[in-house]
Structure formats: structure tokens, C-alpha cells
Amino acid sequence: MLARLTRVAISAPKRVLALAFLFLVLCGIYGASASQHLLAGGYSDPNSESAQASQQIDDTFKRGGLQVVIKLDAPAGTDMEKDQRAAAVGKSIVSELDALPYVQQPILSVWQDPMLASGLVSKDRSSALIIATLDGGEAEAPAHAKEVASRFEGTRDGITVRVGGQGMVFQQVNEQTTRDLAVAEAIAIPISFLVLIVVFGGVIAAMLPIGVGIIAIVLTFALLRLIGTATDVSIFALNLTTAMGLALAIDYTLLLVTRYREEVAGGRDRASAILRTMQTAGRTVAFSAVTVALALAALAIFPMYFLRSFAYAGVGVVVIAAVTSLVITPAVLMLLGDRIDSLDVRRGVRKLLGRPEPTPRPVEEGWWYRAASWVLKRAAPVGATVVVFLLVLGAPFLSIKFGFPDDRVLPTSASAHQIQQEIRDDFDQNLSSSVTVVATGDVSAQTRAAYSQELSRVADVNSVSGAGGTFVDGRAVAPANPADQRGDVGVITVATNLEPMRPAGEHQLAQLRDVPVPAGLTVKFTGSAATNVDTVDSIYAHLPWVLGVIAIATFVLLFLFTGSVVLPLKALVLNVLSLSATFGAMVWFFQEGHLGGLGTTSTGYLAATMPVLMFCIAFGLSMDYEVFLLGRIRESWLASDRSRAANDRAVALGIARTGRVITAAALLMSIVFAGIAASEVSFMRMFGVGLTLAVLMDATLIRMLLVPSFMRLAGRVNWWAPAPLRRLHDRFGLSEEIDDEPPGTRETNKNETTTQENSDTDQPQEPLAPRVG
């Protein structure tokens, strides 16, 4: 298939590139507005109890949408509840809100209901809140919140008016993400280009992976907008698209161009060199893309559309980056030929300094071979030292805590963050932390009153109000509110000032759920605390399936690639070890707040969805490097006498031939993820920092130290598989079948002195010697 695809690309390169450019323009126009069609939520499980309760409230009472909080601040000494000027401003805002078609009822203010003063008036009485909810869900409510802010923010009769709440959090996250995306691209693309000039040597060659990366990003943006018309897609998928599109395009084109140069240096003409490149390095690219895509596809198992969105974006950008590399690269190489190395910076520097061109050296004389040999001779102490180091780094991971992202994901300069923090600091009660109970069934006032009364006796509950009345510490203090009852569905509001994401808030929710429910009544809990607990529980429930799919898919693919059952197990163990160290660092920085949380607000927990997302992405990328390295090691092993010494030599040669490529690819990929680390949204900064550390750690400690140490200690056992599986691999395993070469080409025999400069990481043609276990 690759041979046929390549022949099409090189037979009419100008036509292929022209069609690709036209397709790019069309997709660019369509995908340019992708961010406007994507959403900022999707963290909760739509099948959970809390989500079902919220939906029932919306369906029955037409309320329960995203909250908007209008905060009124008066000069010190003003009593917001009694001051006539403040009351006039507050009542006018309530009246204007009531006239807006997307504002749901009821609108809470101290001027409508003085009993809410503890939650709506600050401790010093100089600030007051007006709380309303907006319909339209996560798709439309953020835009409504922005309209509310533009309408009311400012100063009215000496009263400062600002707007926050969940609706504004979503809106400001959308806007911040769009800005962060531009910053990430502005950081990653020019720096990557400069590094690519050093890696490739030539300016023209360095432009190829950047161009392929931009194509992959643009096409995936269009794909995400298309998917967004059919289902909910998170706006944060754009960040992954930018990072993965650029990183994988660089990764893949680096392999292809390096192999092409080797083939040309070996005496092949242009067409033959391109064809051979695509049949070897191209196969590695295709296999690597399948491995990464399967790891990311596992995210689709989660019910939260935030995580599913990364499956859409991840699989899409991986496939597009691979296909683009396999189509555009041969067309460009055929069109440019030797001109791909024009504007060679390194050659120009050598000429300027009067230095001669370097002569090829045997690979055994290169730095990478010597370094690998040093590790192999000290496999046990090197391996033990690295393992201990990674375990120490991963120790904080044992205290990881998960929670639901709130306003603190935004920078402290964001108004939604500022307002919510002021509410936490200056108000006795935080109404946004209230627990809402949806009671269905028995409609008798006595039954509902008895249940509400028992709820009010739970520790740290301020009050319980609803269709059964209002209760404080088991005492009735106000009659029932008819608006809280529709048919057999009633709403009970449990007011508390405990932080819903803190252990105390979770413990209180558990106590509320343990309150006996009267016969004939069915209850469901929702609110921030319930959503947080349900989200974490849902992630834990689906996590074994996700990990199982990734582990099985990785094992099968690496078995088909190597014919061994030991090497896939080794890859799984080492990757988990590496990622646990990465997560330990994330806990230390972002959960515990060391080093100032790297500029973020530490909440004492990590956004529940991010570690899972980081695991799937980092695991897939680490398998990328695993394939590159094992391909070269297996090549030397199959061409050897299969002795223990041959195993060690194969490992050293594999590292020598891939060390430069893997290191360059990891450096470039870390630059891309570092661009995301500049994000002002805290969990995206964690995402960028975590993946940067994971990539660098994997390319250095794992690939260059732990892998050779393990393979040295395992010896010939590395290549073992039970007899039935060996026969299965003989029939279905990955092996090279080189297609007929174009006329006029000649075969070149590769030997063990292939130079380090012209090495790549593709899958070689397998010799006729039989496989051994």
C-alpha cells in the first residue's frame, strides 16, 4: 500500500501538492471558527446521579442552568440591605434580569428575600450578591453570561457592579483558551523551526516538518468543527491538536528525511531512494501512528465529553499527521531532490571557519554507541539507580487527590476567579456550595417536611428549605415554598458553608446521603459536592477498562512488531514507572503548591480528568519512541548469531542508530508541549508541564538507561515467546516485504558500519534466518 501511495505521490508531485494546498485552504476556511463551535465544560458524567438530578430540575422547573453572580460593592460602612441607594440599584438589576428571556427563575437577592442575607450580604455588609441561572446549557449559557456582564458591569449611583459565577467561568475559559492557543503556537513554531535548522542542517529541510505540522493542525481543526456539529466537543481539544499535530509531524518527517538522505548517500537515485524510504521508515511511521492512536482512542470509553473530545482530536491528528507525512514528504522530496539540503547552515558555518567536511565514521566509534556500551557494562547499578530515582520522584503520587475544576483554573486576574474568591473570604455562606436534593414520589407535606427536618440535623448544615418548609437544626423556621414543588417532583436546598471540593464537604454529602429516606420517596443529590464525588467515582469505574484496552492493544502491537512477549511487558512496566514519576511531580507542583504551583492557584487536588488524559497521551508517545528503538535493535538481533553477546551488541547498535533521532524528536516535542505550559488555565499548564517532563524523561532515563539495562540483564530471554505464539507471529507478525524497485536502481547492502549521521529508526528487511525463542 505504501509503495502504491508513494508511486502516486512521486509520479506527479506538483499535482499532489497543488491538490493538498487546495484542500488545505478549504479546510482552513471551514475550521478557522472551530473554537466558536466547541464547549468549555464536559467534566461530569451525564449518566451520574448528580447529572440526572440537574437535568430533572431543568426539565421540571426550568431552572438549574449555569449560574451567574452579580456582585455589588458599596463604600465601606454601607449596609447593602438597608441603604436606600444600594437597594434601588439592586432592585433595578433584578428587574432588568427578570426581563431577559434566558434568565431562569427564581432570581435570588436580599431585597426579594431577606432570609437569604447570610449568603447574599458580606460580613461587613458592604457587598451584596444577586444570583441567577441561565438556560442554554454549556453551549449557549456562557455567551449569555458575557451579555449579562457587558450589560451590568460598571458603576451605578456609586455602587460598583461586577459579574462572575459558573457561566462567566466557562466564558472566560473559552476566551483564555483561544488566547493561550495563539501564544502556544507563537512559542512552539518559531523555536521548533530554529531547532530543526540545527537538526536538519538546512533551512529548506527544516521547513518541511513545520509545513506538515501546520497542515495536520488545520485539517484536524476542520475535523473537530465537523464533529462538533454532531456531538459535544471540548474547546481544549484544540490545544492537543496544536501540540500533537506539530510534534508528530516533526517526529515523522525527521524519520523520513533522515532515511532518504541515507538512501541517497548509499547510491540510489531520487525515485528509488524515496520508494525505499517509504517502504521502511514509512512503515515505522504507520505502525507508530497506529500505536499512538489506539492509546488515545481509549479515552472514548469515558462518558465525559471533555475526555472523549481528546479521543476525537488525538486519533484525528495522529492519523492526519501520519497520512500527511506519508503523502506530502515524498512529493516534496521528489520535487526538490538535492535542493532539500539547500541553505545548509552547518555546511556554511564549516566553510566560514575553514573546516573540512566531516568524514563518515563507523557507528561503533560514535558517542551514542560508547555511551550505550558503558550502560551495558554497568546494567545492574545503573538500572537500580534510575529505578530508585523514579520511585522517589513518584512518591508524592501516593497522596494524589482528585476534584472538580472550578473558578480557580483561571488566572487571578480573571473577574470570575476574583469574585468567587471574595465570596469564599468575605461571606458567611457560599450559596454556590449548596447541595440540592430532587425528591420524587410521595407528595404529602408531612413526608417531605420530616425528611427536610432530618437533613437539617446533619453537622454543619446551615438550613434546609423546600416544599416541606425551611428548617434549621431540626426546627421549622418558615413555611413551605410552593415554587419548589411541581407534581410529584420537589426540590430541597441544603445550605452549607463547607467547601464542596474539600474532604469536609465530601464527608457532609455522604452524611446527607445516609439520612433515611421515607418510604414512597426517591431522592437524587446534585450540586458542586455531588458532581465532584460522582465525577471522581465515574473515572475510577471506567479507568480499569481504559487501562486494560491500552495494555492489551500495546502488548499485541509490540508482539506483532518484535515476536517477543517479554519486550512488550518490559515496555508496559517501564512506561508506568516513568509516568508515575511524572504524576508525582504534578502532585508536588500543582496539588501541594510547591514553587508557587508554577504560577497557578493550588486547590489541594488535581482536576480529576487531567491525570487520565496525560497518562493516555504520554503512554502513546512513549510507545512511539519504543517502536523506533526496538526496530533498530531487532534489525541487528535478527542479523546476528543470536548469542548473549549479540543481544548486547544489538542493543548498543540500536541506541547508537536511534539516539540522535529520538533525542532530537523529544527535544522538539517538549518545546511544543512547553508552549501549552504557558497557558493561563491551570490544568492546561499542568498538562503542558507534565507532558514536557514525561517526554524528556522517557527519551533519556527510560530509552537510554533503563531499556539497555533491562535488555542486558534479560539477555536472550528478551526475544522469548511460547511456541504457539511464535507460530502466530510467523504468520501474522510485522515483517518487511520490499516491493519491486523502479527500473535503473541498485540495491545497496547495509552493514554494521552504517554511520551515525545517516541512521534512522525504521523497520528493516528481515533476513531468512529462522526466528528463535
Image (cartoon, rainbow, N blue to C red):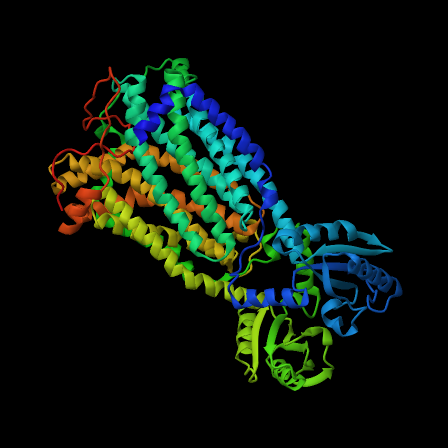
Residue 178 percent across, percent down from the top left: 60, 42
Q: Nearer the viewer, residue 571 or 345?
A: 571
Q: As drawn, which residue projects farthest toward the front?
A: 487
Horizontal arrangement in the rendering, residue 140 relative to residue 130 (left or right): left
| Above or below, comparing residue 603 to residue 720 in the picture | below
Residue 577 is at least partly visible in this image: no
Residue 501 percent across, percent down from the top left: 56, 65
Q: Which residue occupies 73% across, 72% down?
A: 118
| Above or below, comparing residue 434 to residue 257 in the picture | below
Quarter of the image for residue 491 reads bottom right
Q: Which residue occupies 41% across, 14% down?
A: 352
| Above or below, comparing residue 82 to residue 187 in the picture | below
Horizontal arrangement in the rendering, residue 416 relative to residue 353 (left or right): right
Placement of the N terminus among the 4 image quadrants = top left
Horizontal arrangement in the rendering, residue 583 relative to residue 223 (left or right): left
Q: Which residue occupies 47% across, 41% down?
A: 673
Horizontal arrangement in the rendering, residue 77 relative to residue 185 (left or right): right
Q: Nearer the viewer, residue 25 or 694?
A: 25
| Above or below, comparing residue 305 to residue 255 in the picture | below
Residue 394 percent across, percent down from the top left: 39, 56
Q: Nearer the viewer, residue 344 or 55?
A: 55
Quarter of the image for residue 14 reads top left
Q: Which residue occupies 43% across, 52% down?
A: 299
Residue 687 is at least partly visible in this image: yes
Residue 607 percent across, percent down from the top left: 51, 57
Quarter of the image for residue 116 reads bottom right
Q: As drawn, which residue projects farthest toward the right?
A: 84
Q: How many marks?
A: 0
Q: Nearer the viewer, residue 682 or 242?
A: 242
